[in-house]
Amino acid sequence: MVQLLNQLSTVTSTLGAIVLIPVILFVICLISGVTVEKSFRSALLCAVGLQGFNLVINSYGAIVGPVVQSMVDNAGINLPCIDTGWQSVSVIAYSTTVGILFIGLALIIQLVLFLVKWTDVFMASDLWNNYSFMVWGSMIFALTNNMGLAMACMITQLLYILLFSEVIAKRWSTHYQYPNCCMTAPHHMEAVPFAMCMNWLMNKIGLNKIKVDAASIQKKFGLFGEPMFIGLIVGLIIGILGNLQGIGTLAGWGTIMAVAISTSAIMVVFPKVGAVFASAFTFLTDAFRAKAAKSGENREWYLAVNDAAGYGETNTLTTGVLLIPIMLGLSFVLQGAGNRMLPMADLVALPYMVEVFVCTSHGNVPKSLIMGAIWFSIGLVVCSNLAPTFTEIAKGVGFEIPGTATFIMSFGIMAHPFMAGLFYAFWKFGFIALIPLAVIYFVLYFAFKKNRQAIYAWLESNGGVADTQ
């Protein structure tokens, strides 16, 4: 059994999302009654879209990365915990004993809960992102040497994430225009309660009256409000901040303009790649509707898709890119509050990280920025406290620590207070933590099931800016 799980973990980590998700989509299409030809077309479009996302993000990261490093060097501040990126964390997670054992268990739980209709989210279609649970479970095991406790922590996190995903599913699907699809990445979904509460609070104090989103900006400013111009301006800001010492040189301005034009390009190109990815689900959506109409079944369910699907939406990109210099600045300011982490590799992943905030606020950029800055600032302190433990886990599976770092961490995967809160509960209180966490979960679960449509309607009416994408 262990050998089988080890093989499953190896396959998942080796193939990655770019192969695994299209294969799962192909199988789901066939099961749903889609023809072989259309199923293959869906899978191929999905693969092409995912690869397009990777190519664009990697190219952009290669250009922006050195500029961000220059910002850090110019600040002259040494933070000993280095952000090595979500990619390295995923490899580490799939290499641990906990990860090997959990991947099979997670698949079974996600399938069973969907089939018995405990949840209307088919999370198994984004199997890859389960590594986010494995990281926390691996740290529990490293600290307690208790595999049962590690499993209990990860299963509890999984149940909460499934619930949060279902709560926000309709809002995410509507905002990002992926019919009957939702995002289930644990490292993003954990912010749903915070996003809902903060959005309500900001509406109460009048921030919903500041209607700043891509559509309103473009309507008011014409060419100067178009996404590519916004990208140009934001890129100029980042480029200048990263080249203050070379601002009087030709080479400095060459770098500045490269960042500006690249940021402008990503604002234009990424939505087009997103359209290709979205088209992969057309046949499956049609099949859902046809089968529901034929059988008379009223079940509304959502297929989990990779978080890359929302990256290229204009308000999401704008918010994420604006947060790059903001989070760098906050990492310096928060040293007095205990921050020891320097966000680096995952800064270009910020558009992924703000999807919950953006869709909850209906694309309101100022509100999304405020939510992201607050949540991820808390996350920086969380990462700083957990860095020594995670670094030991990384060393244990053979990961080489960069020479400039004392500790390593992933800003994108670990800077998430709710997931950390569940982790701390199990670490400090052991299995006793299951009692209050289970009670809270069941109260939230049945409250949501009883008031699902009212909650969906509330989310649709409390954004402050109408969706216009």
Image: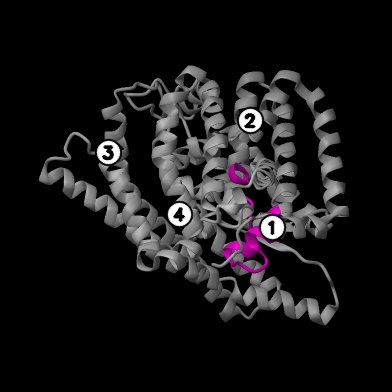
Q: Amino acid at mark 1?
A: Ala
Magenta part of the chain: 168-189
Q: Is 236 situated above or below 295? A: above
Disc 2 element: helix
Q: Is residue 438 left or right of residue 367?
A: right
In front: label 1 or label 4:
4
In front: label 2 or label 3:
3
Q: Is 254 situated above or below 176? A: above
Please state the horizontal and vertical placement of residue 33, each as a whole percent of the image.
Answer: 70, 77
Q: Amino acid at mark 3?
A: Gly
Q: Amino acid at mark 4?
A: Leu
Please state the horizontal and vertical placement of residue 339, each as a whole percent of the image.
Answer: 48, 22
Disc 1 element: helix
Task: Give me the disc on residue 317.
Answer: 4
Task: Give me the disc on residue 420.
Answer: 2
Separation of residues labelled 4 and 2 (CA atoms): 26 Å
Tag 2 or tag 1, which sits nearer the N-term? 1
